[in-house]
Image (cartoon, rainbow, N blue to C red):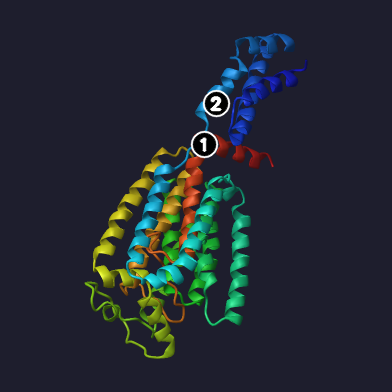
Amino acid sequence: MEVHDQVMTYIDTAKEKMRWKRAKKLMELELSEQLYDEIDQHVQEGLSEAEAVKAVFDKAQAPEVVGDTWDKQYRPKIAWKFGIFVLTLIFIGFAFYLVTVSVNDLFMGYVTKSLFVMLGCGILLWAVICLIDYTLYFRYAKLLYTVLCLLSLGVFYYESTYRNGFDWLNYIFLFFPILWGGLLFYWKNHNYALLKVSLFALFPMLLAGYMMSAVLLIYLFLSYLFIIGYGIWQKWLPLSLLDWIFFGVNAVYIGYNVFYLTYHSPYVYDTPKLLESASFIGHITAPIASDQLFNHLESIIQNHPLIVYIQQFGWLPVIVILWLGLVFLFFFLKMMYKENSALGKLLIFLVMVIFFIQGVVGILDIAGIFLTTAESPFLIYPPFLVAKPIFLVINLMFAGLVSAVVYQQTIGEKLLQMRLKQMQEE
């Protein structure tokens, strides 16, 4: 029997004891490499090929034992605690919301027809994303980014031409920070990596500025700063003078646009007026406009779940959100500490940052500090607790990415190294 056939017979027997298909592939590659290296070593020591093969397999454990060992050591992990906590947040958010609506609204209106349906869709997407090989995220980073940019341009053209204002485009932009992280990992340790990531990050921020969406621009800009900071902390960005110059110019330009949109819009809502019965202070920087466009904005703010909560319960919802946010942060930091894959750590960090920005910006926007303009009446919602249906789905998709990292934690580093090796060979 040829050497290859003997090796593959041994590996196939071991694989029969394993249940996780993704781990089987890793085992085949790692075990075959190990066996061939040992055979080559014996041949170099003077044994014939047949004698080398016999010596290796005489010393090796029974393939059934090897398969059982791998099956116990490398099996998927379910992020039960994380999942239960996310569902608890959603339940608390629903509880806050349900006590503010009538029985008719509950059974006949918005809640039944939208929130529960979207919650089911979001949980389904969460489960599907959890099972995906998350290394796709950086292996096809440029392709995914290109697709998202083309989708953004298509939706931008449609909504600017056939609709009065932007809607779906705002939600598409929420995914850009995730893909920036993939580009950061793809270009890590490359020359001018900071310059490349910054150039790719510029497109959605410029488009958000053109849309006059201060809140969306703040969300993107803060995400960009966190991603660059993480890359510098991990020493993935060899910095040149050109990198620093471009980064500085980019930061100043985007920062100026945020300031201009926030403090020079003629359409600014009066938060204290909307919250006359609540202990919540707004920040007014421009006179109230009374035209139809502003009335549309004011109605959106008045119907915001967090506004309703505060009107009903005063400071309690904000205190609950902040406290649960700290617990959520602890969950993410603990998962980052346990994760052994550099890409897995980056994904967990990115989702943590996105949720953090959503929570902080969502509360400050309602407070009137980050001002939503009537030209682009888009609000960031704190994750899960304050749930607009589409936000709930998007955030459950982000939670799915974290669950995918945890699910593949036992093979994460080996899987990443295998994918990197395949990319180098291609």
Residue at numbered disc 1: 76
Q: Quadrant of the C terminus?
A: top right
Q: Residue at the left extreme?
A: 279
Which amino acid does the dot numbered 2 rest on? Trp
Residue 1 spot, x, y in % from top left: 78, 15
Name the residue located 45 percent from the left edge and 71 percent from the top edge.
Answer: 108
Which amino acid does the dot numbered 1 rest on? Pro
Left or right of 12? Residue 361 is left
What is the C-alpha distance between the residues marked 1 and 2? 12 Å
Q: Secondary structure at mark 2?
A: helix
Residue 309 spot, x, y in % from top left: 31, 68
Q: Are discs 1 and 2 less than 8 Å apart at CB?
A: no
Q: Earlier in the sequence, mark 1 or mark 2?
A: 2
Residue 229: image quadrant is bottom left
Within 10 Å of disc 1 (Cα), the crowding (few <14, some 14-19, many 20+) is many
Any part of residue 255 in sight: no
374 vs 181, nearest the viewer = 374
Q: Secondary structure at mark 1?
A: loop
